[in-house]
């Protein structure tokens, strides 16, 4: 298990409302409980399965193709900063937290620090 939270950012996405966190990593820790399996036909079908599940906000999608594909639906406490597990070759992680999401607790911390440094001369 390796926690990429400290600085690894989602990539730009063409899927509205979704952020792609890159390949070869999945969310599978206790902050992202398992909800079930979705349609593994392709990444869009996997995300649509999550959209149809009221509690889902993250998918781990395996793009192995054919019957070897996989779509795992999860509910992360903070989809803007899921704890990621690396070395999950062939998998990619998508979250329903838009890029630059303000729902992360880290956003509030960083905003407070930014205000402090701007108002306090060194």
Image (tube, helix red, strand yellow):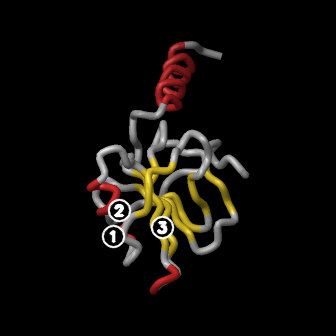
Distance Cα–Cα, label 1 vs label 3? 10 Å
Check if mark 3's residue and mark 2's residue have beta carbons within 8 Å.
Answer: yes
Question: Nearest the camera: 108 or 27?
Answer: 27
Question: What secondary structure is found at the residue carrying circle 1?
Answer: helix
Tell me residue 58's x, y (percent): 44, 52
Question: Looking at the rendered structure, which numbered label has been put on residue 13?
Answer: none
Question: Nearest the camera: 70 or 84?
Answer: 70
Question: Nearest the camera: 68 or 4?
Answer: 68
Question: What secondary structure is found at the residue carrying circle 3?
Answer: strand
- Provide the residue designation for mark 3: 61
Check if mark 2's residue and mark 1's residue have beta carbons within 8 Å.
Answer: yes
Question: What secondary structure is found at the residue carrying circle 2?
Answer: helix
Q: Earlier in the sequence, mark 1 or mark 3?
A: 1
Which residue extends farthest top? 120
- Provide the residue designation for mark 1: 44
Q: Earlier in the sequence, mark 3 or mark 2?
A: 2
Tell me residue 78's x, y (percent): 48, 38
């Amino acid at each position: 298990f390796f926690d990429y939270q400290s600085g690894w950012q989602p990539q730009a996405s063409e899927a509205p409302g979704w952020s792609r966190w890159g390949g070869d990593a999945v969310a599978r820790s206790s902050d992202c409980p398992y909800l079930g399996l979705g349609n593994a036909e392709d990444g869009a079908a996997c995300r649509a399965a999550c959209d149809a599940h009221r509690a889902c906000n993250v998918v781990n999608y395996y793009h192995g193709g054919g019957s070897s594909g996989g779509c795992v639906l999860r509910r992360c406490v903070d989809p803007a900063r899921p704890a990621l597990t690396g070395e999950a070759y062939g998998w990619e992680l998508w979250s329903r937290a838009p890029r630059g999401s303000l729902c992360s607790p880290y956003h509030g911390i960083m905003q407070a620090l930014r205000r402090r440094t701007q108002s306090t001369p060194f």
